[in-house]
Amino acid sequence: MSRTADAAVGMMDSAYFVGRQQLLAFFNDLLDLQLTKIEQTASGAIACQLTEYIFPGSVPMSRVNWEAKSDYEFISNYKLLQAAFSKNGVQRYVDVDKLIRAKYQDNLEFCQWLKAFFDQSGAQRDEYDAKAVRAKGKGGKKYNEKMASGSSKGSAASRRPGVSPRTATTQPRVPARPSRPAAARGGEKAPLKPSSENKASPATVANNNGAKNNAAEADAQLVKKNAELENKIRDLETSVLDIEKERDFYFGKLRSIELMLQVKQDKDFEGCQLETVIESIFKVLYATADEEVAVDEEGEIIPATPAKSEVETSVLSAELSEVLGNEMIMTEAEEEDIGQ
């Protein structure tokens, strides 16, 4: 599998149109689970196991915390996941701050990407014991008891594609043999020419000066042209960034509306009124950049108010206190040296 296969999963890829029920069935069947909500994947443990399935041995499953409940425990799992991605050249940015909040929309999109990446990998491990792998981690046995599933792994294996070849033979390069320097003849020197022959004629000096002046003018023109092109590049980069921001802004609105309708469609639009659905759509369309909205598990539009967790803030405060303490110690040591 190409390690950059994830780059092919763009925003408009069909992977992001996979529904919640299909994703839950995928994880339950492949990893012998019994998930009922997308939010149950927020701890990062399931993503770690799926990555270990695709890249055997890339995630130390004994360090995965299946009992994670706090934000800092979630972050530890995602650090293992990101390390495995980096080790295998997977170019995927994991927005941990959003995922650990266990919001439906953020985790749904990440699960959609995970499934698409698995489908592209072509990974297949017929004798894979998902429960035994989970039991290696912290709280894995208790998690298995909660997630006891009677689903057959054989049917999942029959639906999974075959393993694509991952090895490629390469011929080693043989470095070229360095050439030996010619042996210098000892004591032999080139005869010196008379000083009159070494002097350049006035015409030659004039030609050389003219060539230097032309080269200097050409260099100045090139420098000026280069500066103009650099300014144009900066303007184009700024324009591209503005266009991308605007594109992502409106695409986010479409994604929110799509997710809302998918959830309601899964429930066969039970209890839905046309006026309420239209009002929710308008709420998404008219929301400004400062009024970020999201879709919950029930398909309702709610305000998205990201906030840093108290645990994360306390960790940063502790690190800052440690840095300041080290600086004070160094300052006192310097003053003692000066006094001596």
Image (spheres, rainbow, N blue to C red):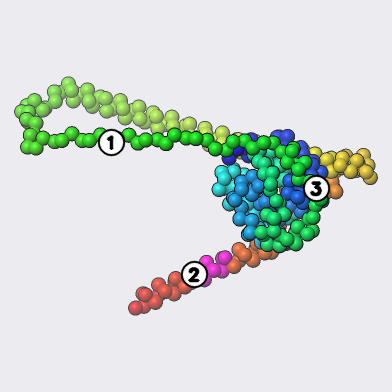
In front of the other: 177 or 290: 177
Dot 2 or dot 3, earlier in sequence: 3
Q: Main secondary structure of the magenta part?
A: helix
Quote the CA–CA distance across marks 2 and 3. Answer: 56 Å
Q: Which mark is residue 178?
A: 1
Residue occupying image coordinates x 31% and y 27%: 215
Task: Please say whether residue 320 is one of the residues in the magenta stretch.
Answer: yes
- Amino acid type at circle 1 is Pro
Q: Nearer the viewer, residue 53 or 243?
A: 53
Residue 151's disc is 3
**Is there any visible trace of residue 314 in the rendered image?**
yes
Left or right: where 202 falls relative to 89: left
Relative height, residue 210 to residue 289 (above, below): above
Q: Which residue is mark 2?
A: 326
Relative height, residue 213 to residue 41 (above, below):
above
**Based on the displayed image, in which of its 4 quarters is residue 282 positioned?**
top right
**Placement of the N terminus among the 4 image quadrants:** top right
User: Which percent across, then down, holds residue 275?
Assistant: 92, 41
Eye-nearest disc, 3 or 1 = 3
Q: Which residues are magenta?
A: 319-325
Q: Residue at x 94, y 45 (%)?
A: 271
Q: At label 2, which amino acid type do we have?
A: Asn
Mark 3: which amino acid? Ser
Circle 2 or circle 3, nearest the eye: 3
- In the displayed structure, would residue 326 be above or below residue 240? below
Quadrant in which the C terminus appears = bottom left
